[in-house]
Amino acid sequence: MRMQTLLRGVTLLVVFLMMVWGADVNGKWKAEYQAPDGQTRTSLFTFQVEGSKLTGSVGGARGETPITDGKVSGDEISFSVTRKFGDNEMKFVYKGKVAGSEIKFTVTVGEGDRTFEMTAKKAN
């Protein structure tokens, strides 16, 4: 009986620590995906995590854009980037779930009128 109680306590502690520490997303990640316009594109992510705060950049055909509003909580990651297209700015909101060396993102474009999925893989 005491062994079961001890085992449950250790299991809960491990789960709690995983939630507090969050997923390790530090470093470079790469995603190849089909954008809403049908084109295949590549994004390169550079992430730095301090506590639950996420900073870094998203790079692509139009250069690098800094991450804003970045957060990591357990295996969930979220951030946004604002890109310029001529005189217009468009916000992209990324929400993802980390599983080992992959992050599955749902990306919302603009005011939420378009979304698409992408999977980023840890780059070596």
Image: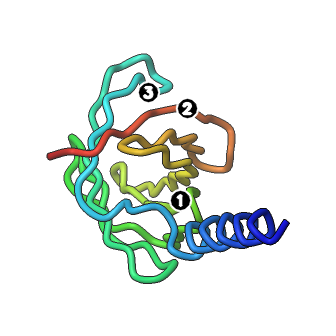
Q: Secondary structure at mark 3?
A: loop
Numbered mark located on residue 35 in the image = 3
**Which residue is located at x 23 percent, y 54 percent?**
28
Of the numbered discs 3 and 2, the one sitting upstream in the chain is 3
**Which residue is located at x 47 percent, y 79 percent?**
53
Of the numbered discs 1 and 3, the one sitting upstream in the chain is 3
Q: Residue 102, percent across and down?
A: 40, 40
In the picture, measured across the screen, residue 36 lies left or right of residue 33, that is right
Q: Amino acid at mark 2?
A: Phe
Tell me the quarter of the image containing the N terminus: bottom right
Identify residue for label 1: 77
**Spatial distance from mark 2 to mark 1, Cα to Cα?**
16 Å
Q: Which residue, as the protein is rendered here, is positioned at the far top?
A: 38
For discs 1 and 3, the disc positioned in front in the rendered view: 1
Of the numbered discs 2 and 1, the one sitting upstream in the chain is 1
Instruction: Please rate how many residues cluster around mark 1, counting C-alpha atoms within 10 Å: few if below 14, some from 14 to 19, many from 20.
Output: many
Are dots 1 and 3 in contact, CB under 8 Å?
Answer: no
**Spatial distance from mark 3 to mark 2, Cα to Cα?**
7 Å
Q: Secondary structure at mark 1?
A: strand
Instruction: Please rate how many residues cluster around mark 3, counting C-alpha atoms within 10 Å: few if below 14, some from 14 to 19, many from 20.
Output: some
Are dots 3 and 2 in contact, CB under 8 Å?
Answer: yes
Identify residue for label 2: 116
In the picture, measured across the screen, residue 65 lies left or right of residue 18, that is left
Between 1 and 50, the residue placed more toward the observer is 1
Between 15 and 43, the residue placed more toward the observer is 15
**Which residue is located at x 36 percent, y 56 percent?**
84
